[in-house]
Amino acid sequence: MRLQLDPSACDGFGFCTGLLGELVAGDEWGFPIIKEASVPAELESYARQAAKACPRKALRLVRERA
């Protein structure tokens, strides 16, 4: 699984950085920066929660292509 971010949709609420700080950091204005797009299996449930919590649906979890 991979994380995708639509920066134009993001309003910088910071839910993703709070729920998935291992893979997503916040910049000085609170907007997310994806540190690692590839989601390890042990973090998939947290990645799903972070994507679901995004009020603007700017963060998505997508399957990697083989």
Image (cartoon, rainbow, N blue to C red):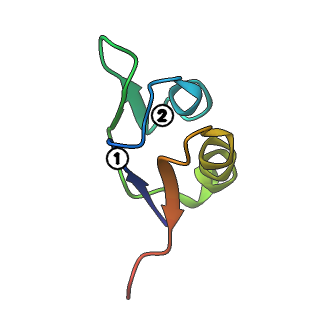
Question: On the image, numbered disc 2 is attached to which residue?
Answer: 22
In the current view of this chain or complex, which residue is farthest to the top? 28
State the SS at label 2: loop
Give the quadrant of residue 30. Answer: top left
* In the image, residue 31 above or below residue 20: above
Going by the numbered disc 1, the residue's amino acid type is Glu
Q: Provide residue 12's location: percent of width, then percent of height.
A: 44, 25
Compare marks 2 and 1 and give the one earlier in the sequence: 2
Question: On the image, numbered disc 1 is attached to which residue?
Answer: 36
What is the spatial separation of the Cα atoms under label 2 and label 1, in whole angstroms? 8 Å
Tell me: 48 left or right of 8.
right
Residue at point 32%, 39% (across, down): 35
Q: Quadrant of the C terminus?
A: bottom left
Q: Are marks 2 and 1 in contact (CB under 8 Å)?
A: yes
Q: Provide residue 56's location: percent of width, then percent of height.
A: 55, 41
Q: Characterize the local packing of mark 1: few (<14), some (14-19) or many (20 or more) Cα atoms within 10 angstroms.
A: few
